[in-house]
Image (spheres, rainbow, N blue to C red):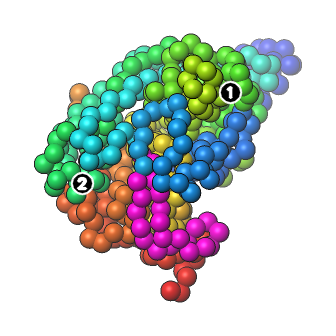
Amino acid sequence: MTFWALAAASPGAALAQSSVRSAILPLSFLRQVQPRTARSVELEGRAGSKKSPGGAAASTLLRTAAIPPAFDTIPFWSGQFTTPGFDSGGNPQSRWPYTMVGTAPESCRKTAIPAPIVPVTVDLLGPDGQVATIAGPPLTLTSDTSLAKTVTNSPVYQPFTYTSGTGQFNDQMMRAQFWDRLHQGADDAWHVTLTPETKCGRRMRIPFGSWFAFADDAGRPVAALVDVNAFVGLLFPPTSPVDDTTVVGAAELAGDITTHDISTFLFNNVFLYDGDLSNCCILGFHSYDSEPGDLKNGNRERRYVTNYASWITNGLFSGGFGDVTAISHEMSEIFNDPFGDNTTPWWLSSDPLSGAQLCQDNLESGDVLEVLSQAVFPASMHGRTYHPQNEALLPWFAFQSPSPANLGAYSFPDETVLTALSPSLLQPQCVPSGL
């Protein structure tokens, strides 16, 4: 850890500087952790959230009905697959409904969804409530239109060529996983695309005691770790009607995001920890803000589908996680599970090289592969090599063998990353059932 000399100051100022220095961590810390995204169950009941990010409020409705209730939100459709398994309580279940973005593959329709990007600059505050410093520039992580442009030039929003065709990352992922429903891929009429637009930047001020930071030798901020409870409380409006005291609430009131959008709140090297630094580092999560309806929208619940995702400077983490890894992960999961309610049979993802494992029972397409050594897919375009994350396809969650997806794959865009199914008939927490 590098320490910086302090200019002559009052005892109070010196004490404040000492406190700030205690929150500065060496950059080598990030190379030693396993970066990941947040799971819905981890975020239940966090301060500032009217419901669990991931959609626990709709969980019962969507799990007991093939057709979801009517919401004022993005276009979505419903389907189901059948395979034996166990629910979260250990009860046998064979029918698994799901909801996805856009329209069903057989519709032969193109769906274009507005995708506003809201850059969010983060100020790390000292004990005095002012933006902290360590004998250098203010500890501010700036997210602006320039960073948003770099993101919109990525394969998440721009056409790139894959084995399934040429198009945006998530559009081609959806086409790959429903390949057998597109007349062997010959039907080019069905697409689900994003239309990005950078909106007014917002600001989040993190109180002292809820953050750690990384800085270079000149005291310039490089990255930050923020307590997830403080972060969620500053991101989502906690009550209705919405006011402008939170980032999402302000964007809603300004009209920068609407219920018809998939909105990204773009941060710059701002990651989260849960409770203590041993639970680090969360790079993103997807959710929605639920607001009551009124006569103007037929009294339908308003759902603002959103994601927090951080831009990642390449080299901060091991495993190739960089630039748009988190953004691609969250967008793909929104496409596959927009309200966080798509349950699946219990599945176990294991990396044969590191031994890392992940056990879940939901259709979170990015989580399956984020623990694998080959988590990212390099894509060179517009003078830069981006690193979107590989994603698991629906046939993997449905335990289909062989896979009806493009090229018989279980993963996209690298079909070689996920070549085998999870052990089947797992009980909760992936305990073998013995059946």
Judging by the rendered image, the residue that carries numbered circle 1 is 237
Few, some or many residues within 10 Å of mark 1 (<14, 14–19, 20+): many
Q: Residue at x 53, y 71 (%)?
A: 93
Q: Answer above or below: position of 75 versus 66.
A: above
The answer to whether residue 143 shows anywhere in this view is no
**Residue at the spot x=72%, y=25% of the render?**
240
Which residue corresponds to mark 2? 181
On screen, residue 347 above or below 79: below
x and y percentages locating residue 224 in the rendered image: 59, 33
| Residue closest to the eye, 104 or 125 | 104
Name the foreground residue: 80 vs 115.
80
What range of the chain is rendered magenta? 79-100
Q: Tell me where residue 206 appears, x and y as whole percent.
A: 69, 26
Seen from the viewer's position, the closer of residues 35 and 38 is: 38
- Under mark 1, the amino acid is Pro
Query: Element under label 2?
Result: helix
> Dividing the picture into quarters, in which one does residue 129 lie?
top right
Magenta-colored segment: predominant secondary structure: strand
| Side (left or right) of 197 relative to 73 | left
